[in-house]
Image (tube, grey):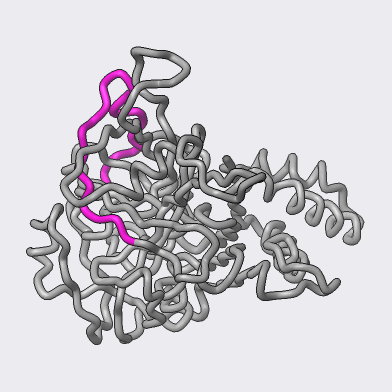
């Protein structure tokens, strides 16, 4: 059974990106400086006033880094009572009007592009489970359907059902700002920038947004066996749902879910400044070395065994024998990020299976049949 170790805390969070279909993950915190990419380790949050945290949704709450040996209390615990996940509580024709709590840059100055951690106050009226998504309807008219609102953009939720303030009233999104540069001039063309990602990243505390959902069941965290193994593979903002999993496993005091298994995260990004939730994840390594593993693939800073750029599939190949043994033992494996990540990963897994004298097609079929295979790409 995982047990929390005393250590200093400072929270960080992340945000997702703009897509007509789906987005994911970022670093969020209540007292963080994203732009500075502070390397302080995180553990359980201790605020100057937990009551103030729970009361404050629009103003920024300042939390201090303190010694704490216990997990964070969460409310309301009746969020644990539902037998089935909430689905499509609010639909595109009748969205919920939510409020922006904060928007923070979640990457360092040398990261290519900008990723933001966006905290949204839903007042406890749009509950969700870890691994689900919210839909955002950006303001303005649909250019393809004059007179109609914009299409819904989906974003993987980057927090647990209790939110970053642990009171069940907020949700966090990981948003990468989508910017278009003209290939001939090299200059930004604002007319072609991502509508929703720029709307979210430009939002200010107190701004209103139109929210739909929650949606999705494929990425829900299976909790029947608290001692199960979970292998999580992400590129960029695809780390969003895993942040929710890991906070539930290691940060929050959830009476009916005491995680004692293994969580293994593989995260692929361009460079160190692009790492999302790094302080938070690193703190889990220190607190729960027997229950958490964290491997990074930094394509612009690391080389694979062939001397090329290090991508997440190269890390998977590096640990392939161990991964296959864990899958044979019933481990769940998750993939979240850009859909372009999957061909390379599939090729790697197929090559490894063949080296082991196995048929990858048969193995994949069995993993899907056993509900061990979870994919959400965009």
Image coordinates for residue 297, horizontal then vertical, percent: 64, 68
Q: Is residue 296 left or right of residue 346?
A: left
Image coordinates for residue 351, horizontal then vertical, percent: 86, 56
Q: Is residue 31 visible?
A: yes
Asked whether 233 or 277 is in front, the reply is 277
Residue drawn at (84%, 59%) of the image:
352
Magenta range is 80-104
Q: Is residue 10 left or right of residue 97?
A: right
In the rendered image of this protein, does residue 138 appear above or below residue 349? above
Image coordinates for residue 331, horizontal then vertical, percent: 62, 57
Residue drawn at (19%, 48%) of the image:
169
Residue 119 colored magenta?
Answer: no
Q: Residue furthest front?
A: 185
Q: Is residue 138 left or right of residue 377?
A: left
Residue 103 colored magenta?
Answer: yes
- Tell me which corner region of the image, top left, top right, bottom left or bottom right, holds residue 88: top left
Q: Is residue 84 visible?
A: no
Asked whether 222 or 346 is in front, the reply is 346
Image coordinates for residue 134, horizontal then vertical, percent: 37, 38
In the rendered image of this protein, does residue 303 appear above or below residue 116? below
Asked whether 127 or 18 is in front, the reply is 18
Residue drawn at (66%, 45%) of the image:
184
Residue drawn at (87%, 47%) of the image:
359
Q: Main secondary structure of the magenta part?
A: loop
- Tell me which corner region of the image, top left, top right, bottom left or bottom right, holds residue 310: bottom right
């Amino acid at each position: 059974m995982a047990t929390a170790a005393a250590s200093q805390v400072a929270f960080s969070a992340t945000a997702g990106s703009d897509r007509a279909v789906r987005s994911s993950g970022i670093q969020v915190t209540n007292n963080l400086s994203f732009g500075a990419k502070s390397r302080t380790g995180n553990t359980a949050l201790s605020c100057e006033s937990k009551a103030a945290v729970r009361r404050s949704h629009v103003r920024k709450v300042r939390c201090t880094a303190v010694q704490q040996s216990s997990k964070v209390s969460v409310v309301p615990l009746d969020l644990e009572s539902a037998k089935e996940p909430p689905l499509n509580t609010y639909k595109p024709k009748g969205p919920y009007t939510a409020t922006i709590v904060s928007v923070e840059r979640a990457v360092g100055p040398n990261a290519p592009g900008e990723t933001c951690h966006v905290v949204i106050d839903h007042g406890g009226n749009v509950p969700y489970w870890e691994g689900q998504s919210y839909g955002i309807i950006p303001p303005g008219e649909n250019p393809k359907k004059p007179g109609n609102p914009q299409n819904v953009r989906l974003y993987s939720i980057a927090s647990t059902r209790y939110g970053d303030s642990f009171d069940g009233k907020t949700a966090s999104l990981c948003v990468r700002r989508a910017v278009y540069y003209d290939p001939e001039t090299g200059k930004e063309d604002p007319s072609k920038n991502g509508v929703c990602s720029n709307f979210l990243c430009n939002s200010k505390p107190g701004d209103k947004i139109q929210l739909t959902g929650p949606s999705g069941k494929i990425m829900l965290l299976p909790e029947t066996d608290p001692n199960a193994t979970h292998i999580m593979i992400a590129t960029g903002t695809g780390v969003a749902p895993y942040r929710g999993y890991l906070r539930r496993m290691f940060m929050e005091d959830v009476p009916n879910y005491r995680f004692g298994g293994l969580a293994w995260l593989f995260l692929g990004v361009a460079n160190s400044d692009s790492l999302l939730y790094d302080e938070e994840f690193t703190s889990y390594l220190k607190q729960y070395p027997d229950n958490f593993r964290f491997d990074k693939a930094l394509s612009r800073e690391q080389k694979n065994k062939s001397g090329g750029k290090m991508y997440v599939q190269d890390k998977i190949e590096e640990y392939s024998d161990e991964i296959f043994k864990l899958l044979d033992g019933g481990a769940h494996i998750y993939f979240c990020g850009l859909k372009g990540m999957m061909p390379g990963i599939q090729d790697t897994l197929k090559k490894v299976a063949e080296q082991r004298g196995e048929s990858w097609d048969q193995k994949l079929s069995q993993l899907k049949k056993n509900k061990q295979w979870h994919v959400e790409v965009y």
